[in-house]
Image: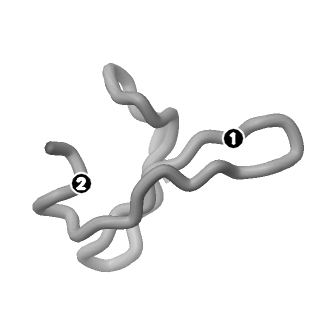
Amino acid sequence: IKRLTNFDCDYRLRCGDYRVLFDVEGDGVLVHRVLHRKEAYD
């Protein structure tokens, strides 16, 4: 898990060639996108 800067999402989780971009809100997690790493940051 890595904290992001200059993105709509606060965190990134790396799962092989895929990236999960998400925020932590209160007691939960809000997943924004699950994409292949080539497409995750466009």
Residue under the point 64% across and 49% down: 30
Residue 12, position in %: x, y? 44, 50
Q: Is residue 42 shown above or below 36?
A: above
Residue 6, position in %: x, y? 32, 20
Residue under the point 40% across and 33% down: 4
Residue under the point 53% across and 48% down: 22
Residue under the point 29% across and 66% down: 35
Residue under pointer 2: 40
Q: Residue furthest bottom?
A: 16
Q: Is residue 37 left or right of residue 1?
A: left
Disc 2 from disc 1: Cα separation:
18 Å
Q: Amino acid at mark 1?
A: Val
The mark that comes first in sequence, 2 or 1, is: 1
Residue 34, position in %: x, y? 39, 65
Residue under pointer 1: 24
Secondary structure under tag 1 reads strand
Q: Is residue 26 shown above or below 21?
A: above
Q: Which of the labelled discs sits on residue 39, or is there none?
A: none
Q: Amino acid at mark 2?
A: Ala
Residue 18, position in %: x, y? 30, 71
Secondary structure under tag 2 reads loop
Q: Is residue 22 left or right of residue 28?
A: left
Q: Is residue 42 left or right of residue 24?
A: left
Q: Is residue 36 left or right of residue 23?
A: left
